[in-house]
Image (spheres, rainbow, N blue to C red):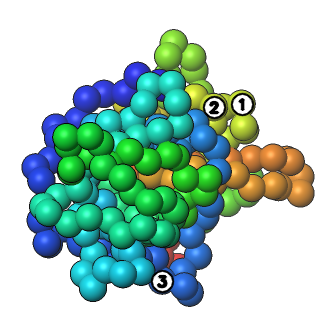
Amino acid sequence: MTDTPTLPRKGLPRSADVLERIKPNASPHEMRDPYDIGETLTRLAESGEALTIYGADLTEPLLARIDSVHPEEPQFTLDVVGDGTIPAGTATFVAALGGNAKLQFELESNWPASPGQPNLVPAVFPEICLVLNRRAAPRLDTPVNGSFAATFTLMNKQFELPLCDYSIGGVGLRATPEQAAQLYLGRKLKRVRLQLGPALAIVADLEIRLLRPFRSFLLGEQVQVGCSISNIEMQMHQHLERLVTSHRGR
């Protein structure tokens, strides 16, 4: 796994942390790469984010955290809150990814607990995770031939990615699969220069919230990179807000 910054770990999940399942009429994208799934589960373990567990024989959902992720094998361990046990069969797990995305996956098991540790339950990586990105603010598409790009340095390498859309709270970027190999959900990009047209450039910290492969007719295989703005100076935020407001009014 790639080294990531250590996050403050949350306390034990409470009833207020219960999340609903992704609705059938939503349009999540699928995460299938075991590396991406491992990175995401590791981030959830580090942050202590609550997992809501739905099972066929459960009258109420259970709550858990990810206690740990195996450093080499596609395995992780659940820390189930309270005295509840996961009933044998298929269980659905739901977790929040940052502030505006939701993760959901299913696993089937008898869910045996670790010897002497009834709250710790081993599990294997899911083959597929659904990720639903919930945009907090409307985003504006950038012109096809405009001067819109994001420039930043990562692991001593310079990146310049086209900017697809932007809002007061975040931006959408486009990357090649080779560029996206350096990116993962939750990764923080520091001091990103966002060129928003020929006359405005701002600097902000970004956090990756969405990675979605797609195929472009002209460019071939590409990856959509959705980012939230995690840190920005007040003056630059005001410039961005004025730009978004002026373009939405047109």
**Secondary structure under the numbered disc 2 in the rendered image:** loop
Q: Which mark is residue 178?
A: 1
Q: Which residue is mark 3?
A: 23
Residue lying at 52% horizontally and 30% vertically, measured from the top left: 73
Is there any visible trace of residue 149 in the rendered image? no
Q: Is residue 48 left or right of residue 27?
A: left
Residue 111: which disc? Answer: none
Contact, mark 2 vs mark 1 (Cβ under 8 Å): yes
Tell me the residue that label 2 is attached to. Answer: 181
Residue furthest to the right in view is 217
Residue drawn where x is 35% and y is 61% of the image: 95
Which marked residue is nearer to the observer: mark 3 or mark 1? Answer: 3
Crowd tier of the residue under label 1, counting other residues whose Cα lies within 10 Å: few below 14, some 14–19, many 20 or above: few
Question: Residue 3 location, x and y as percent?
Answer: 40, 22
Q: Position of residue 129 (x, y in %)?
A: 55, 58
Which residue is at the front of the view, 3 or 169?
3
Q: Are marks 3 and 1 in contact (CB under 8 Å)?
A: no
Kind of residue indicated by mark 2 = Ala
